[in-house]
C-alpha cells in the first residue's frame, strides 16, 4: 500500500512540482516557491545556476510522462515545445 501512497502524493502534487520546475528554469531562486506562492528570498542569491536550469529542463518531459501515468491531469502544458511539436495529433 506504500506504493499507492507515493503514487497518490505525486498525482496530487504534480502541478506544484511542474510549476516549480518552470519557475526555476525561468530563474527563480531554489527554495523560494511554496504552495500558493513565493516566500521571502535571499537578496544575495538571485537565481539557480545555469547548470541546474539546463539539467532540470531535460527532466521536465520525463516528469510529465510519469505524472500522467500515475493519473495527474493537465501536465501536457509543461512539455517542451519540441516534444509538443512531435506529439501525434489525436
Image (cartoon, grey):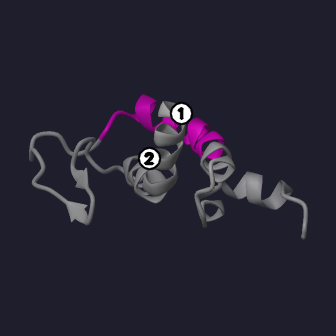
Q: Label 1 belongs to which residue?
A: 3
Left or right relative to 36: residue 55: right
Q: Position of residue 77 (x, y in %)?
A: 61, 65
In the image, residue 58 lies in the stretch drawn in magenta: yes
| Magenta stretch, main secondary structure class | helix
Residue 32 in picture, x, y percent from top left: 21, 49
Q: What element carries label 2?
A: helix
Viewer-proximal residue among 6 and 39? 6
Residue 59 located left or right of residue 44: right
* Residue 76: image location, x then y, percent: 66, 61
Mark 2 and mark 1 lie on one chain; the one further toward the N terminus is 1
Q: What element carries label 1?
A: helix
Residues packed near mark 1 inside 10 Å, few (<14), some (14 to 19) or many (20 plus): few
* Region of the chain picked out in magenta, as a range: 48-63
In the rendered image, residue 55 lying in the magenta stretch gets the answer: yes
* Residue 11 seen in the figure: yes
For residue 27, side relative to residue 78 (left or right): left
- Name the residue furthest front: 1
Tell me what residue is drawn at x 68 percent, y 48 percent.
69
**Which residue: 26% across, 66% down?**
36
The quarter of the picture where the C terminus appears is: bottom right
Closer to us: 45 or 34? 34
Residue 55 in sight: no
Label for residue 9?
2
Q: Which residue is drawn at 48% across and 46% down?
A: 10
In whole angstroms, how far apart are the C-alphas of marks 2 and 1?
A: 10 Å
Amino acid at each position: 500500500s506504500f506504493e499507492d501512497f507515493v503514487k497518490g502524493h505525486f498525482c496530487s502534487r504534480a502541478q506544484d512540482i511542474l510549476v516549480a520546475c518552470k519557475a526555476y528554469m525561468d530563474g527563480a531562486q531554489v527554495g523560494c516557491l511554496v504552495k500558493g506562492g513565493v516566500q521571502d528570498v535571499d537578496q544575495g542569491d538571485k537565481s539557480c545556476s545555469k547548470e541546474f536550469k539546463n539539467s532540470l529542463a531535460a527532466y521536465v518531459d520525463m516528469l510529465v510522462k510519469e505524472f500522467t501515468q500515475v493519473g495527474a491531469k493537465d501536465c501536457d502544458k509543461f512539455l517542451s515545445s519540441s516534444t509538443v511539436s512531435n506529439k501525434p495529433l489525436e
